[in-house]
Image (cartoon, rainbow, N blue to C red):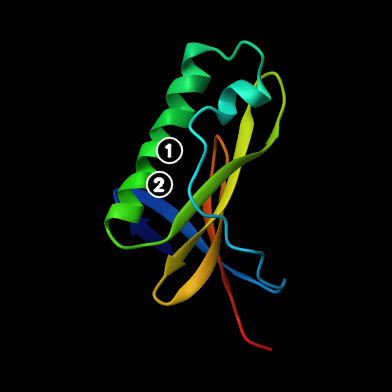
Amino acid sequence: MKYTNLAGINFEEHVSRMHNVAPIRGYRRYEIYDVYAKPSEIKIAIWNSWCEWCEQMNQLGYVCGIEISSHNCNFFTISGSILYEGEVCDLWITAKHNRMYKHFSI
C-alpha cells in the first residue's frame, strides 16, 4: 500500500475509476452540531482536529475542504477533496482509514 503524508497525516493512496466529484472548499466548524443534537466531547474534538488540519492545508497552499458525509450514534465519516500536485483528489476519512483517491484520465 502506498501512502502520502499530508501535514502529518498518512493517507492510503487509491486510484478511482469514478468521475471526479465537485471540489469541496473549506469546512463548517459547527457542522458537528448539525449532525448530532448533543455530540460527545470526543466527537467534537475529532471534528475540530480535522477542521484544524484542513485549515493548515489551506495555509500551506493546498485547496482543502471537508464535510461530515455520514454518521450514526457511534461514528461519523468525513469526505472531502484536496488539490494535490495539480489534481483534485477525493478524501475519505473514517475511524480506521484515511484514504485519498486519485483519478485517472480515460
Task: Determine contact: label 2, label 1, CB under 8 Å.
Answer: yes
Residue 71 pos. (x, y %): 69, 30
The residue wearing badge 1 is: 51
The residue drawn where x is 71% and y is 73% is 19
The residue wearing badge 2 is: 54
Residue 1 seen from this side: no
Q: Which of 46 and 83 is in front in this view?
A: 83
Quadrant housing the C terminus: bottom right
Q: In this view, does 15 lie above or below 56?
A: below
**Quick check: 104 left or right of 100?**
right
Secondary element at image label 2: helix
Total count of labels: 2
The residue drawn where x is 62% and y is 10% is 38
The residue drawn where x is 67% and y is 65% is 21
The residue drawn where x is 57% and y is 26% is 32
Secondary element at image label 1: helix
Q: Say few, some or many: other residues with alpha carbon within 10 Å of mark 2 (under 14 / 14 to 19 / 20 or more).
A: many
- In the rendered structure, which amino acid carries the disc numbered 2? Cys
Q: Say few, some or many: other residues with alpha carbon within 10 Å of mark 1 (under 14 / 14 to 19 / 20 or more).
A: many
Residue 57 seen from this side: yes
**Quick check: 16 left or right of 81?**
right
Residue 68 pos. (x, y %): 62, 38
Residue 101 pos. (x, y %): 57, 64
- In the rendered structure, which amino acid carries the disc numbered 1? Cys
| Identity of the residue furthest to the bottom in this view | 106
